[in-house]
DNA sequence: CACAATTAGATTGTGTGCAATTAAAAATGC
DNA sequence: GCATTTTTAATTGCACACAATCTAATTGTG
């Protein structure tokens, strides 16, 4: 009897870890929101801009691979970024199936304003650099195992 | 110059940790989805059912506090669970502002079918028990610090 | 070359998440 | 004891997130 309950508790660990991840993601979002409101970006939009600030003129597919998002999410998001004059969407000439995303001058300028974000995030975590790096690496390893298990 | 780039990398750590959490949450969802499809539940609906299986007849507010969700999310979700005959929503007699959520017989029965879920999750993480527990505890601590920083 | 298979995005539909507002009930203050 | 404030849900509006489906373009194969 005792043994069985113990087994249930071990089983529940996966559920608990998932909920910890899920609720921590929401908590991060609550910290990012007021910072990103000033840039008129949502968090997923900010992620796309980070990709573009790192390398401009990327195809939708590559953005999706980097962020683990599909076109059903990215297409409307990118249209909103285009409506906000931050990016331009153009069909590739070499392969007309691809849509390339390029920063506008305003999109490039926003990078300067966005530099205040990481500092505030770092402070909110109240973690040491090594703790952050360790947690990041463990989560990335876990994520990759989960994606493998999901049959990717 | 070198020092400045190093500083930027440290700053980016918060961003990277947040993205690791965000993308791991999605990865977990991809693992849960086929399991929960059999129960005709989404992951947030599953979380609500876990709360109710632990204690029945809970107010919406308490569910929200446990799961860090507000009524804008929970009200439609609970209505869908009610439409699926898994719960019943009734106004409290003592405090008519509160809506109490009670499991139906079908809602209670579903608990048995749901017992297969945690085992599959545990396997998908490919983690040891101690790794899971450590990761869970670190994330909960991080989440609480973030919520504190967000001014809760 | 022809034509099937694959690939890249867009579209549609469902279900979260959350901010802001509203409405009703309960608690509080004077 | 009544007006004010607070609390609890519901509602509305916006933005993801993803499955399923569709179209157009490219690639692979004979």
Image (tube, coloured by chain):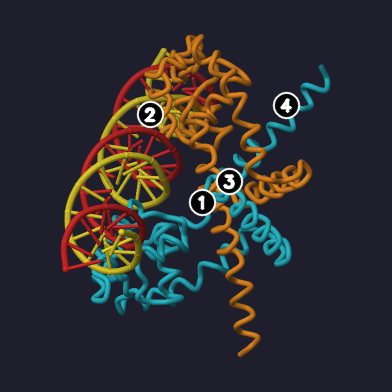
Chain colours: A orange, B cyan, C yellow, D red
**Image location of residue D18, percent across then percent down:** 44, 44
- In this rendering, do the residues under marks 4 and 3 share a single chain? yes
State the CA–CA distance, disc 3 to disc 2. 31 Å
Give me the disc on residue A76. Answer: 2
User: Spatial distance from mark 2 to mark 1, Cα to Cα?
Assistant: 32 Å
Q: Is residue A39 above or below residue A124?
A: above
Q: What residue is disc 1 on?
A: B152
Snapshot quadrant of residue A89: top left
Q: Are marks 4 and 3 in contact (CB under 8 Å)?
A: no
Q: Badge 3 is on which residue? A: B149
Q: Spatial distance from mark 4 to mark 2, Cα to Cα? A: 31 Å
Circles 2, 1 touching at the beta carbon (< 8 Å): no
The chain letter for the residue carrying disc 2 is A
The residue that disc 4 covers is B8
Residue B136 higher or lower than A85, as above or below? below
**Going 81% across and 16% down the picture, which residue do you hit?**
B1
Q: Quick check: do tags 4 and 1 share a chain?
A: yes
CA gap between label 4 and label 3 equals 22 Å
Are both tags, 3 and 1, on one chain? yes
A32 to the left or right of A55: left
Mark closer to the chain start, 4 or 1:
4
Q: In the rendered structure, the residue with mark 4 lies on which chain?
A: B
């Amino acid at each position: 009897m005792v043994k069985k309950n113990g087994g249930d508790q071990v089983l529940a660990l996966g559920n608990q870890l998932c909920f910890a991840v899920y609720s921590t993601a929401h908590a991060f979002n609550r910290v990012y929101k007021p910072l990103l409101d000033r840039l008129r970006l949502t968090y997923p939009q900010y992620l796309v801009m980070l990709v573009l600030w790192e390398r401009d003129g990327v195809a939708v597919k590559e953005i999706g691979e980097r962020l683990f998002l599909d076109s059903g999410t990215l297409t409307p998001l990118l249209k909103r970024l285009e409506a906000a004059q931050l990016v331009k969407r153009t069909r590739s000439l070499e392969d007309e199936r691809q849509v390339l995303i390029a920063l506008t001058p305003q999109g490039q300028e926003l990078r300067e304003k966005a530099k205040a974000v990481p500092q505030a995030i770092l402070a909110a975590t109240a973690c040491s650099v090594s703790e952050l790096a360790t947690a990041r690496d463990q989560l990335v390893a876990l994520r990759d195992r989960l994606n493998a298990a999901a049959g990717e």
